[in-house]
Image (tube, helix red, strand yellow):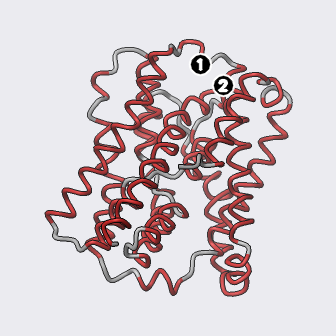
Amino acid sequence: MKPDKFVLALFISVVVAWFTPEAGAGASRVFLDKIASGGIMLIFFFYGVKLSPEKIKMGLKNWRLHVLIQVTTFVICPLLVLGFYPWMQNDHQRMIWLSFFFLAALPSTVSSSVVMVALAKGNLPAAIFNASISGLIGLILTPLWMGIFLQQQGDLDFLRIYFKLLTEIIIPVIAGISVQKLLGGWAAKYGKQLSLFDKSVIVLIVYKSFAQSFHDGVFSEMRFLDLVFLSFATIALFIILYGLIYLITKLLSFNREDRITALFCGSKKSLVHGTVFSKVLFNDASVVGFMLLPLMLFHAFQLFIVSYIVGYFNRKVQ
């Protein structure tokens, strides 16, 4: 299997941030922040442009599948991580746990979920509907989940958070939807270029976040064993979530196409939304890199394992 270029770019940006933290922190951070904010607004504007009402309507009928995917994404996954909170004994452990809970509270991916479902011959209209609606639901539920614990730490300003959500995400999405008929064809034609732009903005935000974290010494207390733990815990979270979805689809007697869609859409987490939300939710810019670390590991693993599973489903069909 070929390595994913986007994943490689993300980890390269972290390495560059390690060697050149001053370039992404300090005085240059304000300039990079403005570029990142403008990029985020454009990402979600084109997200709205690509929300085809016709394709979404096609997927509305299968309500059991939709409920399972959204409940798995926004209820079951956060509760799996929430159960470990009482075991956190000190500030360092709580910070590691919070980064996992942030991962668990995020919406599902959009593009990769749809692509994987299409390759595995799943229910594509339902995948498009759930991948699209998950991002919109996440605008409300992810900040609410995180607010429970950020408020305890005194690191929560709901007015600031929802103002940034409104100006950088919600208004651009609404603007994109309003011109969907005018620009929808153009966005579909240049989908690859828009995807490259999205990924470039995310790489910039990841670099800036980790540069600030390295500059402020946020990772100074992290040991090698912590990194090993993070890696195994993210893999375990994906496997448990995937297994639960598989069991539930068996109990509900889903057909093969719906099972594939539930597995791929319900077990994924969006790096795009996670990167954006991290920029919005956390007042302290230096902790953003720490919060993104489990998400980046999860994203890399989910691409690797789901690519293998797609091949498995295709072999079964053949």
Mark 2 crowd level (few <14, some 14–19, many ≥20, 10 Å Cα): many
* Residue 164 image offset from top left, x and y in percent: 65, 51
Mark 1 crowd level (few <14, some 14–19, many ≥20, 10 Å Cα): some
Q: Which numbered dot is residue 249?
A: none
- Amino acid on which the number 2 mark rests in the picture: Ser
Q: Which numbered dot is residue 213?
A: 2
- The answer to which quarter of the image holds residue 32 is top right
Q: Is residue 206 above or below residue 39?
A: above
Q: Is residue 153 left or right of residue 181?
A: left
Q: Residue at x 40, y 73 (%)?
A: 121
Q: Residue at x 47, y 41 (%)?
A: 298
Q: Residue at x 24, y 57 (%)?
A: 246
Point out the tag, 1 or 2, that comes first from the N-terminus: 2
Q: Residue furthest left?
A: 251
CB under 8 Å between discs 1 and 2: yes
- Amino acid on which the number 1 mark rests in the picture: Phe
Mark 1 lies on residue: 219
* Callout 2 secondary element: helix
* Callout 1 secondary element: helix
- The answer to which quarter of the image holds residue 197 is bottom right
Q: Is residue 63 left or right of residue 114?
A: left
